[in-house]
Amino acid sequence: MKLPGILFTLLTSLLAWGQTPKLPLHPQRLKIALDPGHGGEDAGAKGPKKLLEKEAALELAQVLAKTLETAGFEVLLTRTEDIFVPLWERAQKANEAGADLFLSLHFNAARSKGARGSEVYFLSLDQGDADAAELAKQENAEDKAPDTQDVVAGILDDLAQKAFLQDSERLAVAIQTQLNQIGNIKQRGVKQAPFAVLRRAAMPAALVEAAFISNPREEVKLRDPAFRKKLAEAVTLGVRRFFASGLPTSKRKAILGPR
């Protein structure tokens, strides 16, 4: 390959002096895949004042995307409007984009209107405890992967997420720690559950139940842009601290090869 004359002369001169040329580096920005839960005909949970989880999740994702981009990350949304996206396709979008993290955004619901606070989950390869299994069953109800899905690719996805479980737990803890500091949100702790949307993500992944939409007070807060911004800032800080504590393991490349 022929190099432009000036660059060739520069390289030749540096090599002649036994030096290694220092070329400018342009590191690729870390990419975060945000998955606003539900959408379209799948409304998700409903608050006492009729706020729909699918709407609240998309609104939070849009605010979170801005705060992450301001922090220097590249952001991909699995949906940007009120449409239905199958669970398997959400993770596939993140995988195909080569995302470095996958965050699925949801809002919790409980029979008790007093239940409040945030919960952050990472994948469990078994059923987990009874409450986690029930929640996962509800969220997995729309998991209808096509019969034509590549079986080998599915196995590789399983292996990749298994390889990232420790990173996913670190991610969940980092985000939960920040959400705990938001005023009037009770600590509920990091948990594991067999969420289908996490199982297929070939990267560190977590599912964030940011608040209880079934709680009248928290439903009111979720309609407040200032509160949504607080949630977004807390999640963003958790993501930043996750990366600050060490980049994710490189096991994905060993399993899936170069992206």
Image (cartoon, rainbow, N blue to C red):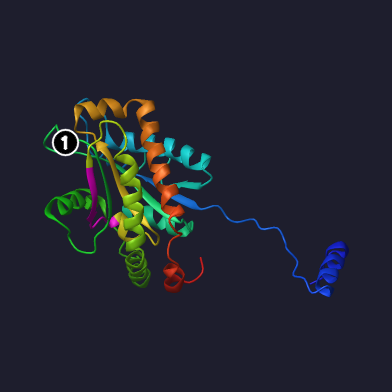
Task: State the residue at coordinates (83%, 63%).
Answer: 7
Q: Is residue 257 left or right of residue 4?
A: left
According to the picture, the residue beneath numbered tag 1 turns out to be 115
**Main secondary structure found in the magenta portion:** strand
Task: State the residue at coordinates (87%, 67%).
Answer: 9
Quarter of the view holding residue 10: bottom right
Any part of residue 213 in sight: yes
- On screen, residue 247 above or below 114: below
Callout 1: helix, strand or loop?
loop
Within-10-Å neighbours for mark 1: few <14, some 14–19, many 20+: some
Q: Is residue 243 left or right of residue 29?
A: left
Quarter of the view holding residue 161: bottom left
- The spot of residue 89 in percent (x, y) is 37, 55
Q: Is residue 247 left or right of residue 140?
A: right
- The spot of residue 226 in percent (x, y) is 38, 26
Span colored in magenta: 188-196
Q: Quadrant of the N terminus?
A: bottom right
